[in-house]
Image: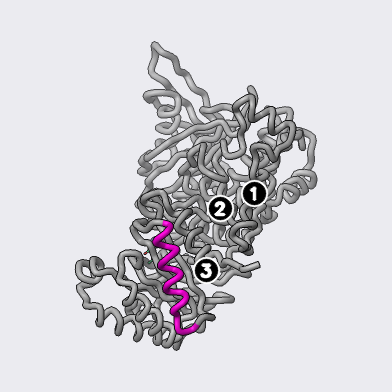
Amino acid sequence: MRKVLILDTTLRDGEQAPGYSMNQSEKVQMAKQLDRLGVDIIEAGLPVSSNEDYRATKAIAAAVQNAAVTAISRCVKADIQRTWEAIRKARHPRLHLFIATSEIHMEHKLNMTEEQVFETAAECVAYAKSLCDDVEFSAEDATRSDRAFLLRLFNRAIQEGATTVNIADTVGYATPTEMHELVSYLKSNLCDPSVKFSVHVHNDLGMGVANTLASIHAGADQVECTVNGIGERAGNVALEEIVMALHTRRDYYQCETNIDTKQIYRTCKLLTTMNGVGLAPNKPIVGVNAFAHESGIHQHGVLMSPQTYEIMKPEDIGIYRNQRVVLGKHSGKHAFADRIAELGYSMSEEAIVAAFERFKRLAERKKEITDKDMEALIGAGALAIRETYSLKSFVINSGPMISATAVVRLVRDGQEYEHVARGEGPIDASFKAIDRIVKMQAKLENWTMQAVTEGEDALGEAVCKITCNGHQVVGRGLSSDIVEASIRSYINAINKAVALEEQDQLLQEQEN
Ligand code: KIV
Ligand code: ZN
């Protein structure tokens, strides 16, 4: 069966969208999960955009074991040189260059003629090839560009050493039929048929998946996508949707990918945990309703035979139907670690120890710990960070006739600190009490709460986003008590902000 390569650009095109920024350690953690997922190429960043991005790209290049690691650069020699520095230590480095090719972009953005774009691209591909064997060349806004020019440019890029050529539907403008025609035309006229043909689409008109699949049908060898479809404006095409479409309709597309589909759910979950942006319940593949059957007729059908209304199995993407009781208060760390492995998660010893602490706390209150509880506990670990501050206790006094008061006690370096504050409600009051203890200028941007497990002792997950000393961080807290979950999320965010500040100081010292 024909193989379609998956280039994941969550950490570059996805991350640059507002609300999705990640810090270096989160990016490395995400890159490792993408590697486990089986993506062929990880696009790690745009290293010339900032020193932070450069360092994060470098760290990803060093951490990834199997996938190729690429980073993108404008067709500017100094940028290519710096981009190469960031990825050169990867096991399989790839340099990715792009230049705009549509009249609109060339005239209004680049202020260049077609011939200037042509010569610049040729020169830069040749330069990139002198540094790295694997070179991808992308035409930005290709779907609004002149076809004959695109073909001439791609053939020249190939002569200069490009190993992959990519068309970008940068503004999500194309239709599936147009994509099919464009890919067929370009691919069949390339001067070297062994060069990989790639597509990169955005979802402005909601046609991202259809456009990508039409391109695959027309012969595209590589597709570029992001986890959960995050990205500028309406986002990029979602990796999980493309992969599952190819998997489910193998009969039609006759293609396969290297993705381990059982890693899809936890990859998507890791990302939502990190950026604190939830998914629509009806999001294909990974939304909470994606496998839920509400209507009686459907439920009856599924009970008779799942095939009646299910074209995919939740297990295919790593969701386990069994809400079986796995562990309880008396379970030990080994049983806990075994269950984590059975659920398909790979965690460091340190992360297991931290998750086990959370498990013990939960098991004190909740008799039965289900797989869903386990996933919530593991997810909380995704944002685990050194606990500079930890929660010792809190007391809330609140009601309709009084203003809420919170007394919060935190521990730092073995010493206890307590403060009291009033607020608009119990959560506002407790956050203010924490602010008084930690004495940091934290601004709460966003706070959400949702039940992540079922039943009367359901676990509530609070996610808060704060800005602190120029860093935007997401904190997450889990508890069957919603005020406690909120307090824990705020402390988690504060601890992350403290860690980032320490990291900033360290880097500054190194630079001086
Ligand atoms: O959308 C786009 O045009 C891109 C390219 C630079 C590949 O992300
Ligand atoms: Zn893009």
Tag count in the figure? 3
Is 182 a magenta residue? yes
Residue 337 — which label? none
Main SS type for the magenta part?
helix
Foreground disc of the pair 1, 3: 3
Mark before the other along the chain sequence, 3 or 2: 3
Q: Quadrant of the C terminus?
A: bottom left
> Badge 3, how many Cα within 10 Å: few under 14, some, many 20+?
some
In this orientation, which residue lies closer to the viewer: 320 or 454? 320
Is 126 a magenta residue? no
**Which range is magenta?**
176-192
Q: In the rendered image, which residue does mark 2 sit on?
A: 240
* Residue 210 in the image: above or below residue 128: above
In this orientation, which residue lies closer to the viewer: 323 or 245? 245
Residue 15 appears in the picture as rendered: no
Residue 466 appears in the picture as rendered: yes
Mark before the other along the chain sequence, 1 or 3: 3
Residue 317 — which label? 1
In this orientation, which residue lies closer to the viewer: 56 or 509? 56
- The secondary element bearing badge 3 is classed as loop
Residue 219 — which label? 3
Type of the residue with mark 2: Glu
Counting from the top left corner in percent of width and height, residue 116 is at 25, 81
Mark before the other along the chain sequence, 1 or 2: 2
